[in-house]
Amino acid sequence: MSNSAKIIIVLTVITLFSGGVLALLDNFTAPKIKAHQEEVKNRALRAALPDNDRVQEVTKGDYRFYAAYRGDEMVALAFEASGGGYQSELRLMVGVTPDFSTITGAVILEQVETPGLGTKIQEDPANKENPGWFMGQFTGLRTEPEISYVKNEEPGNDHEVRAITGATISSKAVVNILNEHIKKAEAAWNE
Amino acid sequence: MKEKPAIQEFIKGLWDENPVLVQLLGLCPTLAVTVSAENGLAMGVAATFVLVCSSFLVSLLRNVIPNQVRIASYIVIIATFVTIADRFLAAYTPEISKSLGPFIPLIIVNCMILGRQEAFASKNKLGRSLLDALGMGAGFTLALLVLSSVREVLGSGTWFGMDIMWASFSTWKVMSLPPGAFLTLGCMIAAANWINRRRQT
């Protein structure tokens, strides 16, 4: 057998074997990974939406909305919002009242910010009683005229949150993402 | 050349030829993921798994793979095991998978792993290759565990997520940030060199 034939056969067999093994493995792991992602989404929806009887998914424009109903009345809408943080892409799940004027809840789905500083937007270990205080501030927050943040003082208005000391850029990123996407989502929803 | 006892192949990876402290291989994941001891251990175990499985196959196929395509073959083999490790972590330990992020797929380009295939597994019998891979993997894992423990204890005041420092301890933020990895690794390599120098004289 010539050397080139051997090269072709060996590489083909190795790659075929590799593909086969991975396809088999995917059968086992794909459902588990999918179930986990579902769970993360459902947990986020529970945090972002108020008590409800059922959640209906609707796609409009660029957004996938999760509309929460109590009886026949729509009580809130949730959707995903993402944008740049200090060093990573931030993905949030945000819930708003049907008129988009008040946030019913917002949670972080994904962030890889600076450990110990930017990560406080999700979990602040220094605040033992309420490690999620930063995102908690958004519940009940007014979105008009626009969400803004204050530094080193208690927020005085109903559309203000307190930024995290040492993580102003991450805090600001969350506020900017929410402002941008709430406007865009409202336009998409009313289309 | 007289053959070394087989157990030497395992032991050399732990200290004398430690991939991180002596060969300075695989430093990208070493520096990047060692923010917490849990991450360091997970990266060490995942890399060891890939290394051992790849060395097994490469050593087994060492007389079959033509010389011209050996690197391509090693990479396919390594990539297969890396994907297995990646999917497995994502399915069973999603939290760890998330915090290691892209660094699990990046094990493919960890030069420690390709280096061992080229330098050892492709030239040695199965048993020795496995011992060599296990030793190198253990040395890599130990180095990562020490590095990540120092960084987590000083940077976050915890070890494997448990509070272990006294209440008034103020965390050294820099240890959680990239410079902390360089500082700690530098001290570790200096210490290893110092100890080796002392042993020689």
Image (cartoon, grey):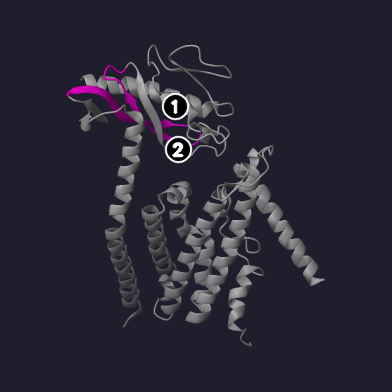
Vertical order, B52 against B160 (above or below): below
Q: Can you tell which quarter of the image residue A184 is in?
A: top left
Q: Residue at x 35, y 41 (%)?
A: A40
Q: Position of residue B136 (x, y in %)?
A: 57, 68
Q: Is residue A139 magenta?
A: no
In the rendered image, residue A116, in percent from the top left (x then y), is placed at 57, 37
In screen coordinates, is A146 left or right of A96?
right
* Amino acid, disc 2: Gln
Mark 2, secondary structure of its residue: loop
Q: Which mark is residue A111?
A: 2
Question: Can residue A61 be seen here?
Answer: no
Chain at numbered mark 2: A
- Taking depth in this image into account, of A151 and A125 the one nearest to the observer is A125
Compared with B62, A100 (above or below) is above
User: Which residues make up the magenta segment?
Assistant: A72-100
Q: Give me the disc on residue A136.
A: 1
Q: Position of residue A73 (x, y in %)?
A: 20, 21
Residue A6 in which image quadrant: bottom left
Q: What is the quadrant of the N terminus of chain A in the image?
A: bottom left
For residue A77: magenta? yes
> What residue do we see at 46% from left, 50% from top?
B96
Residue flagged by tag 1: what amino acid is it?
Gly
